[in-house]
Every structure is written in structure tokens, then in C-alpha cells.
Image (cartoon, coloured by chain):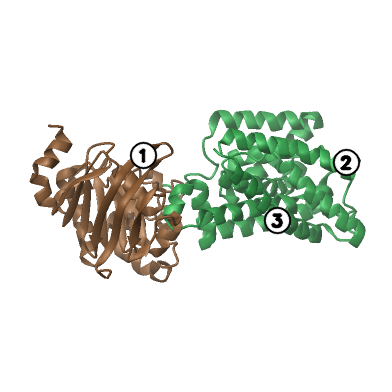
């Protein structure tokens, strides 16, 4: 029954914080090697959705399946162990660790351990700046380097599904092109990427599939470039 | 040669101080708040050591090992208690540890009386005289055990996978969870290390000074001061901070008299709170 190519399936999920419900029956799917985008205005619930998938929040209704297995209700580290990794919006680097140590901790999960040195080489190839600054403290890096480290650290976990929350936030526009290339490269090798964020054009252009989230509901979906031109997108994002 | 004496005795005392602070610092890292009952945990270790010494004739090192293992078990009740405090605000946990400090003091007074006790062993009288300075066996044993445990802790934190995971948990528990690190298990490990190091420090303390149930709070203040100076998750920083602190303390006592010992302690704490945001060794490898 389950399509083996479907990596992530979110069905009818409701979630939120204490008394505030944020997501109202969200459903979406992501296939292997696909770049999937979730866009929407501030407060639409993009971060909440990613947190719920990662296991940082428990859905109050609905189910989340990863490679056919239900993962809603599992703690975040157990979801990581199954192959889902989040690169959080505010990066959450370990400031008093070196670049190298941050990357090593990124490869902590049991599934990633056997490939640690291999993954490190992949990350250094994608982001040569990190190799050059391997022994620098994480909080001494520039904003762009910190973002590279956050993504590199996420890749160290060798996820099958990478969740990126606002990956271009605070990134100089000269760097975003390189970032998109790096992300496409890992997607071509079979990693599924779920992107959420504000840089709508950038994100939708590279997305094979995209969802427009507004006030906790999916209001439109389709291939990224199509959604980019859809009137619903303009309405939700520009308010008119 | 008071200067040389202060230097050597202070270094020895300082290595023990580093050990005293190590358990406090790790507990702070995982619980995100000061454990004001740290000194009392050390004293529980001291009384365990005194009992082992009196009933089985254990020396300070054996007593420290056994007391350390025993006090590591405090991690389970501590975590159970922590998980029951919701929301686990730092102030609430801090208040809890203050209450725990008073509770343990009174339980120890009931159980062991207010008498001052000392861990006596066959080598207690042995004195070593390097460069004309007298160093007692108790002080040397405490220094060697402190240095050894700090070194092991340093290697564990810097070189091993669980050690790095523990440091990551101390720095940002949420991010650690996102890396697949089982945060609750790491917190348990941190509390066990914290309790174990406190317990191990106890019998060593009882070879350095007389102990009674109420001598805990100054120990907590020393541990707190060194943690601010040395940083969390850095055993080398704590060792350095401990030695510097021990040397200055010895100099203060030698030059100004023992009455100034506690004044120096609180003065150092105040100075540190004014100035430093991070540990002594912070930024060592920064480029």
C-alpha cells in the first residue's frame, strides 16, 4: 500500500503550544530526493509544522509517517535516529565548541556514526570555508559561516529527510546561490529536503513540490515554480 | 620561604579545589542552576569516608572511590525531583537546592552530631619536604587525586563521544536533542558525574580539615567561584582556576593572616561577577 518513494507523509495534523492551536489539519507528502517547500506569511505555522515533524512538539490530532512508520509521539532524538534532522531557524550552534566539534556532535546518532569521516569530507567539500576554520570557535564565525556550519552539522547526521527552517535568514544574497546549489546536490543524491521560509522566490524556484500555508491550513499546493505565479500565493504573501 | 610555601601548598590545595568545583560545574551544566547543596553532598561523601575508615580502616583514596560511586547514585532521585518541577525555572530549582542544603545539614546533625571529625590513617603523619617546604600526606593525596580525576574528566569531556555529547547538552539541550543526543540520559549522566565527583571530594576534604555537618556552604561558594572562573564543561579551566585560587589564598593567609581567608573568597567571587562572562580558558583556540 505504502509507496516506497514516499519518505514523509503528514496527515491531518493539528498541533500548537499549550492553549494556542497553530496547525489545523495539515497534510503533505514528500518523495525521495525531492525538494519540498512550505511557504506562507509570518505566523502561518511553518516552524510549528517542522517542529512537529521532528518530534519537538506532539500533534494533538493526525499522524506523521516517515518511510511508512509512525513517528508522531517519538522524542526528537529518536526521530533523528530514524533519519530526520532539523536545521533550526536560529541555528542553535554549540558556541563553546569548535567548528570541527560541532560537526562531530552532528554525527552523534547511531545511524550516522559509521560514516562520520566520510560525511565530514562531504561537508568540507560542500563548504570549504568550514575546513579552513575547523578549529575556530563556532561563535567566532560570520553569519554566513555559521549558517554553513548549521547545515553541515545537519548533514553529518546523514538524514534521509532534512528539515530546513528559514535557511537563508541573515544570509548575504551572494551566498544564497551557493547554498541552493549545495542543497540541490544533496537532494540529487537521494536526500529529501523540506524547506520552510520567507525567501519565497528562492525557495519556490528550487522546489519540486510546494505548499502554501496560511493561518495553519494548506491553502494551495503544486510544483514550486507554478505556485510562485499562483494568485493565491500573492494574496497570502502580499495580503492582496 | 613563605612565598615558595604558599606556591606549593596553594597548588596542592588548588588541585583539590578544582575537584571540588568539577562536580558543581557539571551539575550546573545539565540542571542550568547552581546546586546550593553541593557542599552537603561533599560532606555526605566525607561521612561515608569517615565510616569506611572507622569500620574497615579504609584510606582516603579507597574511601574517595567508594564515596564517589555511592554519591553518583544521587542522580536518580535528583533527576526525578527536577522532572517534577514544572515549569523548571532556574529560580525554583535554585530554591529547591537551598532547601535540600538545609535538609541535609540537619539530617547530618541528627545522624553524625555536630562534632568535628578528621579522617585518620596510617600515613596521616607523613610529611614530605620538597625544597624545605612541609607538605602533609593528606594534602598531597588530595592534590594527586584531584589532579588525576580532573585529568580523566578532561579527557572524557574532550576526547570521547559521550563526553562531547554531555558538553553539547550543557551548552544547548534543545540543539543536542536535534543532533540525536538523548538529552535526559545525558542529564542523568551529568548529575551522576556531579554527585560522584562531590562524593569523591568528601573523604579527601576530611584529610585536609576537620569536618562537621555545617561546613558545607563555604565549599559551595568555592565551587561556585571556580565554576564562574573556569567555565562549565572544561576540566582544564577548573584546574587552572583552582590552582590560581589556591595560591592566592595561601598568599593571603601567609601575608595577612587566616582571618582574611573568607574575605578573599568572597572578594574573588565579587570580582568575577563584575568582570568575566566566560571561563579563563575561553577563546584559547579562537582564531
**Closer to the camera in the image, B54 or A138:** B54
User: Which residue shows up at 38% across the image and 44% down it?
Assistant: A140
Q: Which residue is mark 1?
A: A21
Q: Chain of mark 3?
A: B
In the rendered picture, chain A carries what hue?
A: brown
Q: Chain of mark 1?
A: A
| Viewer-nearest of discs 2 and 1 | 1
Q: Is residue B2 visible?
A: no
Q: Is residue B85 above or below residue B148?
A: above
Horizontal relation, residue B37 to residue A155: left or right: right
Quadrant containing the N terminus of chain B in the rendered view: top right
Question: Residue at left 81%, top 58%?
Answer: B63
**Residue B73 circle label:** 3
Q: What chain is colored green?
A: B
Viewer-nearest of labels 3 and 1? 1
* Residue A208 pos. (x, y %): 16, 57
Q: Residues within 10 Å of mark 3 (few under 14, many from 20)?
A: some
Q: Which mark is residue B110?
A: 2
Determine if residue A160 is in view.
Answer: yes
Q: CA distance from mark 2 to mark 1?
A: 53 Å
Amino acid at each position: 500500500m505504502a509507496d516506497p518513494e514516499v519518505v514523509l507523509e503528514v496527515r491531518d495534523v493539528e498541533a500548537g503550544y499549550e492553549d494556542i492551536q497553530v496547525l489545523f489539519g495539515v497534510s503533505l507528502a514528500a518523495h525521495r530526493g525531492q525538494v519540498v517547500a512550505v511557504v506562507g506569511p509570518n505566523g502561518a505555522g511553518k516552524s510549528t509544522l517542522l517542529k512537529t515533524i521532528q518530534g519537538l512538539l506532539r500533534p494533538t490530532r493526525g499522524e506523521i509517517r516517515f518511510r511508512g512508520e509512525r513517528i508522531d509521539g517519538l522524542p526528537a532524538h529518536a526521530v533523528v535516529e530514524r533519519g530526520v534532522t532539523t536545521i533550526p531557524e536560529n541555528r542553535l550552534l554549540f558556541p563553546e565548541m569548535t567548528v570541527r566539534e560541532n560537526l562531530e556532535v552532528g554525527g552523534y546518532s547511531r545511524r550516522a556514526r559509521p560514516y562520520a569521516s566520510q560525511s565530514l569530507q562531504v561537508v568540507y567539500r560542500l563548504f570549504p570555508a568550514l575546513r579552513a576554520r575547523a578549529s575556530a570557535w563556532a561563535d567566532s564565525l560570520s553569519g554566513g559561516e555559521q549558517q554553513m556550519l548549521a547545515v553541515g552539522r545537519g548533514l553529518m547526521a546523514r538524514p534521509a529527510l532534512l528539515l530546513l527552517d528559514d535557511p537563508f535568514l541573515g544570509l548575504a544574497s551572494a551566498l544564497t546561490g551557493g547554498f541552493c546549489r549545495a542543497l540541490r546536490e544533496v537532494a540529487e543524491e537521494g536526500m529529501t529536503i523540506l524547506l520552510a521560509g520567507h525567501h519565497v522566490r528562492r525557495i519556490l524556484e528550487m522546489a519540486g513540490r510546494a505548499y502554501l500555508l496560511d493561518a495553519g491550513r494548506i491553502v494551495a499546493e503544486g510544483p514550486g515554480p507554478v505556485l510562485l505565479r499562483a494568485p493565491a500565493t500573492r494574496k497570502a504573501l502580499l495580503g492582496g | 620561604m613563605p612565598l615558595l610555601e604558599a606556591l606549593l601548598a596553594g597548588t596542592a590545595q588548588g588541585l583539590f579545589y578544582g575537584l571540588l568545583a568539577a562536580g558543581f560545574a557539571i551539575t550546573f551544566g545539565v540542571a542550568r542552576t547552581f546546586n546550593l547543596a553541593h557542599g552537603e553532598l561533599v560532606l555526605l561523601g566525607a561521612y561515608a569516608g569517615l565510616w569506611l575508615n572507622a569500620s574497615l580502616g579504609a584510606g582516603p583514596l579507597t574511601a574517595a572511590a567508594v564515596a564517589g560511586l555511592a554519591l553518583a547514585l544521587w542522580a536518580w532521585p535528583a533527576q526525578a525531583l527536577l522532572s517534577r518541577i514544572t515549569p523548571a525555572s532556574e529560580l525554583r530549582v535554585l530554591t529547591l537546592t537551598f532547601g535540600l542544603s538545609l535538609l541535609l545539614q540537619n539530617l547530618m546533625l541528627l545522624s553524625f552530631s555536630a562534632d568535628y571529625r578528621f579522617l585518620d590513617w596510617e600515613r596521616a603523619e607523613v610529611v614530605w619536604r620538597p625544597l624545605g617546604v612541609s607538605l602533609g600526606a593528606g594534602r598531597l593525596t588530595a592534590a594527586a587525586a584531584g589532579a588525576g580525576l580532573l585529568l580523566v574528566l578532561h579527557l572524557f569531556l574532550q576526547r570521547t563521544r559521550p563526553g562531547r555529547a554531555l558538553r553539547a547538552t550543557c551548552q544547548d539541550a534543545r540543539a543536542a536533542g536535534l543532533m540525536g543526543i538523548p538529552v535526559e540520559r545525558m542529564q542523568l549522566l551529568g548529575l551522576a558525574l556531579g554527585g560522584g565527583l562531590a562524593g569523591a571530594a568528601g573523604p579527601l576534604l576530611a584529610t585536609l580539615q576537620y569536618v562537621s555537618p555545617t561546613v558545607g556552604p563555604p565549599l559551595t561558594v568555592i565551587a561556585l567561584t571556580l565554576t564562574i572562573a573556569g567555565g562549565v564543561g572544561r576540566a582544564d579551566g577548573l584546574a587552572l582556576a583552582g590552582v590560581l585560587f589556591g595560591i592566592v589564598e595561601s598568599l593571603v593567609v601567609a601575608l595577612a593572616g587566616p582571618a582574611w581567608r573568607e574575605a578573599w573568597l568572597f572578594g574573588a567571587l565579587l570580582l568575577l561577577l563584575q568582570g568575566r562572562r566566560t571561563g579563563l580558558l575561553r577563546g584559547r583556540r579562537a582564531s
